[in-house]
């Protein structure tokens, strides 16, 4: 997946549609950086940093030298409407899904979502797709509707998730699709809305707490998917060593099949990390949080130890 450019270009002239972007999170930050690199500077609405809903959630207000950014000042559009500028339409990026419920905006609102809707609706879409080993995903833009992530689709792009990609790579690709969509709106593009096939739709809850603990009894492929699903910008998959809580943030499959000791046994250590036996095969954990972010090769975890 390509990295996001951060340079700033001259403003695009004679826009045909004024777009207000409701942005938060890493996806919002990367989308705005891409827009700036293309000379596009829509007005932006965001939550103040202290109200952001998750760690590593993006630095929207650090871009105030390039964009005019309005604070929403509340969890609902009804609380923010008076402080926001006029617009022809709005686009939301990593935004509260019920923000407009009960108080619809006076212009079309297009929500963006990191999946090929109607698949993987809800806040847990990114991690769940990595958990399940999804290789073809995408970015969907849809009109505000009655159900969560259930409105009519107006724009959809496929995104390939390759071996070795982590959620941040996928988010970067989604941001590129968001930036293209916003540019098309500004240029006056018209989109045909099509209803979702609700029979295919399903919702993913946000994963919390002990749901992120690694089960080394699973296959190496499954453990790889699990650790990758909670890599940056998420806080990592949890395991324990000597009673100390650790978080794995980088992983690769070393051996796909075969038995190499009890699941959780550390079988080797190298510059690449620690190799751990799984229910079938082994994985190499390359990066961990243990009293800070460190290379697993520099940790106190040694061959013969058990992690759990």
Image: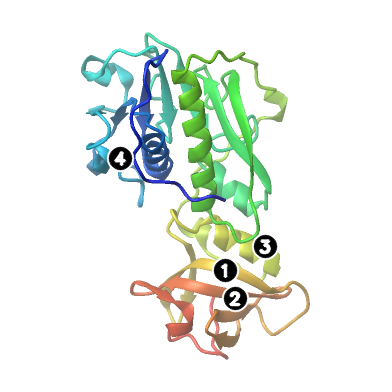
Give the Cα separation between the discs numbered 4 and 3: 35 Å
Q: Is residue 160 above or below residue 65?
A: below
Task: State which quarter of the image contains the C terminus.
Answer: bottom right
- Disc nearer the start of the sequence (2/4): 4
Question: Is residue 218 visible from the viewing direction of this image?
Answer: no
Q: Is residue 100 above or below residue 220?
A: above
CB under 8 Å between discs 2 and 1: yes
Percent x, y for residue 65? Answer: 22, 37
Give the Cα separation between the discs numbered 1 and 3: 11 Å
User: What kind of element bears circle 3?
Assistant: helix
- Disc nearer the start of the sequence (2/1): 1
In the picture of the structure, the residue carrying the numbered disc 1 is 251
Q: Which mark is residue 62?
A: none
**Quarter holding residue 40:** top left
User: What kind of element bears circle 2?
Assistant: strand
**Quarter holding residue 242:** bottom left
In the picture of the structure, the residue carrying the numbered disc 3 is 222
Q: Which mark is residue 60?
A: 4
- Residue depicted at 32% across the width and 23% down the height: 76
């Amino acid at each position: 997946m390509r990295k996001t450019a951060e340079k700033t270009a001259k403003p695009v002239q004679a826009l045909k549609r004024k777009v207000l972007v409701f942005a938060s999170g890493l996806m919002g930050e990367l989308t705005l950086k891409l827009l700036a690199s293309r000379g596009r500077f829509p007005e932006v609405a965001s939550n103040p940093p202290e109200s952001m809903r998750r760690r590593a959630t993006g630095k929207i207000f650090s871009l105030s030298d390039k964009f005019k950014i309005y604070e929403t000042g509340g969890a609902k559009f009804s609380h923010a409407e008076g402080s926001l500028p006029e617009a022809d339409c709005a686009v939301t990026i990593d935004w509260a899904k019920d923000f407009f419920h009960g108080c619809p905006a006076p212009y079309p609102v297009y929500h963006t979502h990191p999946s090929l809707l109607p698949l993987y609706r809800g806040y847990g879409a990114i991690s769940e797709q990595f958990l399940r080993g999804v290789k073809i995903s995408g970015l969907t833009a849809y009109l505000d509707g009655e159900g969560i992530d259930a409105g009519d689709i107006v724009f959809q792009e496929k995104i390939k998730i390759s071996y070795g990609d982590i959620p941040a790579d996928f988010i970067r690709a989604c941001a590129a699709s968001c930036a293209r969509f916003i540019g098309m709106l500004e240029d006056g593009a018209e989109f045909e809305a099509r209803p979702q096939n609700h029979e295919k739709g399903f919702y993913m809850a946000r994963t919390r707490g002990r749901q992120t603990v690694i089960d080394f009894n699973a296959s190496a492929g499954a453990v790889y998917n699990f650790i990758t699903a909670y890599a940056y910008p998420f806080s990592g998959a949890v395991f324990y060593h000597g009673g100390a809580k650790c978080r794995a943030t980088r992983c690769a499959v070393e051996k796909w099949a075969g038995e190499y000791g009890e699941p959780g046994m550390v079988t080797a250590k190298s510059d690449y990390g620690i190799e751990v036996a799984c229910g079938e095969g082994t994985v190499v954990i390359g990066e961990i949080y243990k009293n800070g972010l460190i290379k697993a090769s520099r940790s106190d975890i040694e061959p013969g130890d058990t992690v759990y």
